[in-house]
Amino acid sequence: MAVYTEVSDEDLEAFLAHYALGAALSCKGIAEGVENSNFLLVTESGPFILTLYEKRVRDQDLPFFLGLMDHLAAKGVDCPVPVAGRDGRALRELCGRPAAIITFLAGMWPRRVTPGHCGEVGGALARLHLAGADFQLSRNNALSVAGWHELFQRCRERADEVQPGLARILAAELDAITAAWPDGLPTGVIHADLFPDNVFFRAEKLSGLIDFYFACRDFLAYDIAVCLNAWCFEPDGAFNATKARMLLSRYRKVRPLNEAELEALPILARGSALRFLLTRLYDWLNHPAGAYVRPKDPLEYLRKLRFHQGVRSLGHYGLDGDPVRAG
Amino acid sequence: MAVYTEVSDEDLEAFLAHYALGAALSCKGIAEGVENSNFLLVTESGPFILTLYEKRVRDQDLPFFLGLMDHLAAKGVDCPVPVAGRDGRALRELCGRPAAIITFLAGMWPRRVTPGHCGEVGGALARLHLAGADFQLSRNNALSVAGWHELFQRCRERADEVQPGLARILAAELDAITAAWPDGLPTGVIHADLFPDNVFFRAEKLSGLIDFYFACRDFLAYDIAVCLNAWCFEPDGAFNATKARMLLSRYRKVRPLNEAELEALPILARGSALRFLLTRLYDWLNHPAGAYVRPKDPLEYLRKLRFHQGVRSLGHYGLDGDPVRAG
């Protein structure tokens, strides 16, 4: 949860003058999103999300993120879209930060994930990948292999404060992943952070995807690997192969996976687990005292990483079929 | 800001079945209120506030708080009211906590307080006092003089961690206030926590009062003293007599103050400053590591206390008239 920037009523009024949304009836900071300041803004036209982009989001990436939402929505993906002001612009400044008003998406994210949710997510992810195919803007994945090396260097010295021996484990895993990382897999726009709190449901039906602020170009199958980590582990740490099967099979009905993608899943899942382990470790070691955000436990991802290290066949992910190469 | 309890979609669905509000379209934790978990709940009937009462609020006080909102609203005070379920009850349980759905009040609280805001607050406070006169339930002010002694005993040993000599200052002030505390002033229902974030405005007009969870019976003039502290100091610590004059004069137009109440204002303001100094000090010394809430600076209220100690005439509060007894 995070609200970093306080928006005064005068500042909001001046900001809203750029839009044809009527006056503000209410504006409340919401306890969602870690990277940005988010407000539930109710105007005379209804509810919206007001987002102020905080320093972790680079200004030059914002046209990619906002353009992507517009593109995906135009292709039928259920996602919020930026609201243009009277001048046609969606991105402007508020309280010294880049800011945008985004449409309100009804739904709630699932606190207790079911196999049914996982199936819905698999289908939606595949539709997102197809819809993104002709999006013209580009953004590299800053949090892929090269980024992990950089992040590790910034945590290395203090990693053992979290668990003795962690720096050594991370160095070895980083080497193994770098050596085994695939190339030539189908590439496109990925969400890259499709955790349960970014997927809304009404009853059991998926109502939309939010938070595209890690979206980038990378292997499409890497996005699936992120979802395996984010959706298919139980709170006790056990991997739920039924959930994985639901997620993968519903994905493949919309966008088939080729042999190379299937074979790469375990190493992509290890990479994805390492990515969240490293960012959480960095946040754990660097969160300011008295910050609003309670850092997430990095070691949850060490346990997930260990699971994927042990995967020897796609049967571990609930799929029948051939053994895969050990990553 | 605070969201302490996470409400699952299933729990919310079962809870909403008690109401005729339709299904939930959205439920987001909001970063307002320190004592309770608050959610902006949008149902098919519109927006509401869902409040889960956390441990600081005593169960036996809830009928007083909820009944008071109903009573005040029926008397024309702009404030939210609890929504009754199909069974007629407004208070039930969610996630193991007492919980209620409250109507949504449009408006925003002022981040930059103007004399105009202070005038509006003064008038609204007086109307609240008049409207509460025939409310039948009772609740003592747990945070009046006896409560301050108790709180001080729980902070005394560690007070000097915040500022050397603070324990000695507090002990002396507590003695002085106890000796000079008035009796026989007009008594009734007070809000007791009418800070700017509990008062909503649309444009420059007050649209309503929220957060009655410190309301109790006490001297009506003590509520004014709370507002002098909460509304009339500038961010740099200076007291703004123009704001105080606006607040007091608009109050007196609705409910005249008698001589004893006017004379008591400086000591009541000292008591109110001491109350927030002590609760903030307690929270400062006892907030758990990693808590969501950033504790507020207790020393802000030491500076306010010092101002009121120096008040020798009501002219300091922007009123013409006689010198007052030094408290």
Image (spheres, coloured by chain):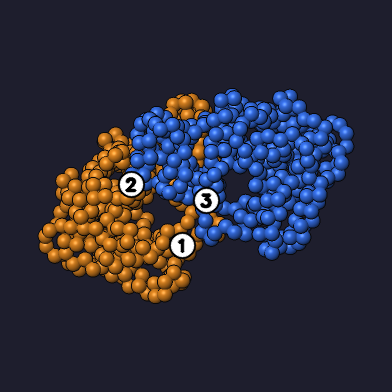
Chain colours: A orange, B blue
Which residue, given by chain and number where applicable, does mark 1 sit on? A284
Real-space Cα separation, disc 3 to disc 1, in angstroms? 28 Å
- Above or below B295: residue B98: above
Real-space Cα separation, disc 1 to disc 2, in angstroms? 25 Å
In this rendering, do the residues under marks 3 and 1 share a single chain?
A: no
Res B55 label: 3
What chain is tagged by disc 1? A
- Above or below B56: residue A236: below
Q: Nearer the viewer, residue B103 or A237?
A: B103
Label 1 sits on what residue type? Trp
x, y (%) of residue B143?
A: 66, 47
Q: Secondary structure at mark 2?
A: loop
Q: Nearer the viewer, residue B5 or A193?
A: B5
Earlier residue among tags 1 and 2: 2
- Report which quarter residue A100 is drawn in: top left
Label 2 sits on what residue type? Pro
Which residue, given by chain and number where applicable, does mark 2 sit on? A110
